[in-house]
Image: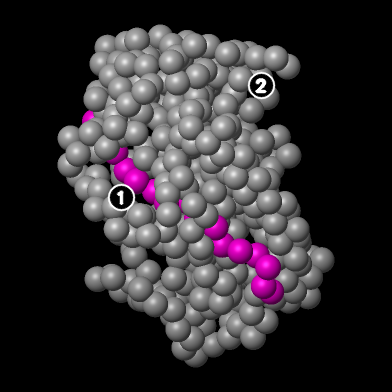
Amino acid sequence: MTLLKDKKIAIIGGGPVGLTMARLLQQTGLDTKVYERDKDQHARIFGGTLDLHQTSGQEALKKAGLLDSYFAMAIPMGRTFADEQGNILLSKQPLTENPEINRNNLKKILLRSLISGTVVWDSKLTNLEVQDEKWLLHFEKKPSATADLVIVANGGMSKARNFVTDSQVVYTGTFIIQGDVAEPEKKCREFYQLCNGNIFMAAHQGTLFVANPKNGDSLSYSAFFNASEEWVNNNNLNFQDKKSIIEFLTGRLINWDERYTKLIRATHFFVGLPTRKLPLEEKWKSNRPLPITLIGDTAHLMPPFAGQGVNIGLMDSLILSNNLTSEKFETIQAAIEDYEQNMFGYAQKAQVESTRNEIEMRNPNFTFQHLSRE
């Protein structure tokens, strides 16, 4: 604790990685604030469930004293692989060692673990500057704040990362449309039954379809397909107009079984996301004016094809917090440099795995047929 005694720590971003980082630092009594752009704690997080890996995500939650809470709220789920006609190729039994947790439930666990007032909601960071040997944080329509150490965890498109690296986010070639269906057992009964309580996966001619029938009170799904960067920038899709997205998606899946199209027509919420990556080939800046570093997607954004994003981010929070609270390092900067050196190693491996899987699944000839023969 010596390094950060009487220091103020600002974490930018209240996602699972930023909140876990705050919990780990608060366990040693450090003065920690999380600045989150969401209006309040009730803001809903959309996206698929998370399975936290034993050697990364679970290790961070264990250190945070929250592993039992994770297992209490998470659901072991198997995998069902099918073709575009809904023919089941293979089903795998649930894995109890890394169950799936809804993102909003994980957020609740983390928020309950923090000291009241730790998260400053409705705080969109607009700028960082140095003043009187401290960081001065500016927010949209909110008072400024000061900090001795800034940890940036506000997502893949963060502007604050420019203090640490000149690397730019690049598009990787896949576009994702995510959808949620409320009361799926009623509104898309046939597809819900097809899932049989498992994560459901199908692929056909370059389109990958992944669904989870137990994502909180909804069935959530994602359709992944190849798309040029020009198309991404000029597709004119309006995700506030459900009808137009339903027409687009059903058009892409025109030769798929009607259970898929009925699911799409029952969808109450859509969002579109291009897959992006932050390359880690270049070294980060060494001439930072004051202690600052990056964790989570802000540090190593990668496509979601290896289940590594949040897990690697939680590993960041574990290693960085250990460094900052140990007596191993003489300066905060030395603790940060050691974390970043370690992070570059494991995050690059995860990015390679994710890229390899993305390329394979974007192949028009990719199917899950081989699984039925294994």
Q: What stretch is highlighted in magenta?
A: 268-283
Picture coordinates of residue 15 (x, y %)?
A: 46, 50
Residue 246 visible here: yes
- Report, in whole angstroms, how far the alpha carbon at label 1 lies from the one at label 2: 46 Å
* In the image, residue 281 lies in the stretch drawn in magenta: yes
- Answer with the quarter of the image where residue 244 lies: top left
User: At x 41% / y 38%, what residue is drawn?
Assistant: 47
The residue type indicated by label 2 comes to His
Q: What element carries label 1?
A: loop
* In the image, residue 275 lies in the stretch drawn in magenta: yes
The residue that label 1 is drawn on is: 40
Q: Nearer the viewer, residue 203 or 54?
A: 203
**CB under 8 Å between callouts 1 and 2?**
no
Residue 8 visible here: no
User: At x 50% / y 19%, what residue is drawn?
Assistant: 83
| Left or right position of 300 against 198 | right
Picture coordinates of residue 142 (x, y %)?
A: 28, 70
The residue type indicated by label 1 comes to Asp
Pick the quarter of the image with the C terminus: top right
Q: In the rendered structure, which disc, 1 or 2, sits on the residue that comes first in sequence?
A: 1
Pick the quarter of the image with the N terminus: bottom right
